[in-house]
Image (cartoon, rainbow, N blue to C red):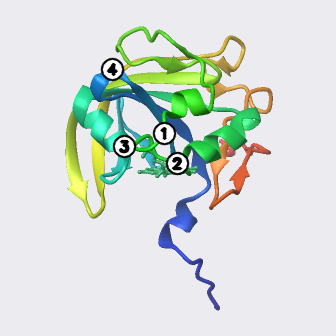
């Protein structure tokens, strides 16, 4: 057998779903950044984990407010999603710069990004520092999606198709399903 090796180990774990993390920062200002190193962790209590670079402004904001909203974008938002990851809230007001419409969340005081197609609201319950990131554990306080975007089993693909991050500017959409035999 012969093998190939991508540039980074984690490319073997991509593509993966992208969220836009909206946070409340010092001074009551809001920030937004894309993240794809996010995963469900437990069902009871409903919990997710997300790896956040400790150099990012989002890190500072999560430390400040201990909560966030996770906004699931669709293919139409791919340019905005990518660009939100190329600048830092340390230097610019990304909400203004990208003209993001925010609206009230249900269970946290941080708003949601209205143009997304799905939303998860959460509060930090613990964390662990690993290398350059803080791996945050968030309890899910509420979750919902745009009307008709989901059935009880999840996304109505391809009608609603959350974008997946490959590498750099490359993103994917889920294209086909396979069903395991009984
Ligand atoms: C598609 C995509 C996924 C990303 N995933 C993550 C991630 O999971 N964790 C992370 O810390 N940064 C991730 N980044 C990088 C941050 O979004 C980027 O550093 C951003 O500018 C930080 O913004 P902030 O300083 O305003 O928080 C990702 C970027 C892109 C474009």
Label disc, if present, on residue 57 of the rendered structure: 3
Q: Name the disc covering residue 92, or none.
A: 1
What residue occupies the far front of the structure in this picture?
A: 91
Secondary structure under the numbered disc 4 in the rendered image = helix
Residue 32 at x, y percent in the picture: 48, 34
Q: Residues within 10 Å of mark 2 (few under 14, many from 20)?
A: some
Report helix, strand or loop for mark 1. loop
Tell me the mark number nearer the camera, choosing from 1 and 4.
1
Crowd class of label 3 (few under 14; some 14 to 19; many from 20; radius 10 Å)? many
Residue 24 in picture, x, y percent from top left: 35, 25
Mark 3 or mark 4: which comes first in sequence? Answer: 4
* Badge 1 density bin: few <14, some 14–19, many ≥20, Cα 10 Å: few
- Residue ID at (70%, 35%): 77
Of the two numbered discs 2 and 3 on the same chain, state the one appearing first in sequence: 3
In the rendered image, which quarter contains the N terminus?
A: bottom right
Q: Is residue 133 visible?
A: yes
Do the CB atoms of the residues marked 2 and 1 lie less than 8 Å apart? yes
Task: Choose the circle earlier in sequence order: 1 or 4.
Answer: 4
* Residue position marked by numbered label 4 in the rendering: 28
Q: Nearer the viewer, mark 2 or mark 1?
A: 1
Label 3 CB-ligand 1 distance < 8 A: yes
Answer left or right for 74 relative to 8: right
Rendered residue at 30%/61% (across/down): 132
Q: Dot 2 corresponds to which residue? A: 87
Q: CA distance from mark 2 to mark 1?
A: 8 Å
Residue density around tag 4, few if under 14, some if 14–19, many if 20 or more, within 10 Å: few
């Amino acid at each position: 057998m012969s093998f190939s090796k991508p540039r980074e180990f984690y490319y073997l774990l991509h593509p993966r779903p992208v969220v836009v993390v909206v946070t409340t920062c010092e001074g009551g200002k809001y920030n937004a950044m894309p993240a794809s190193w996010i995963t469900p962790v437990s069902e009871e209590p409903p919990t997710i984990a997300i790896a956040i670079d400790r150099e990012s402004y989002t890190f500072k904001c999560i430390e400040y407010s201990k909560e966030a909203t996770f906004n699931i974008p669709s293919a139409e938002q791919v340019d905005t999603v990518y660009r939100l990851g190329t600048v830092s809230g340390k230097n610019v007001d990304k909400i203004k710069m990208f003209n993001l419409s925010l609206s009230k969340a249900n269970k946290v005081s941080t708003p949601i990004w209205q143009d997304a197609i799905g939303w998860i609201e959460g509060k930090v319950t613990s964390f662990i520092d690993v290398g350059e990131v803080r791996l945050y554990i968030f309890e899910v306080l509420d979750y919902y999606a745009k009307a008709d975007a989901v059935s009880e089993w999840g996304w109505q693909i391809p009608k609603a198709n959350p974008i997946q991050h490959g590498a750099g500017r490359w993103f994917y959409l889920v294209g086909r399903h396979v069903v395991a035999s009984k």
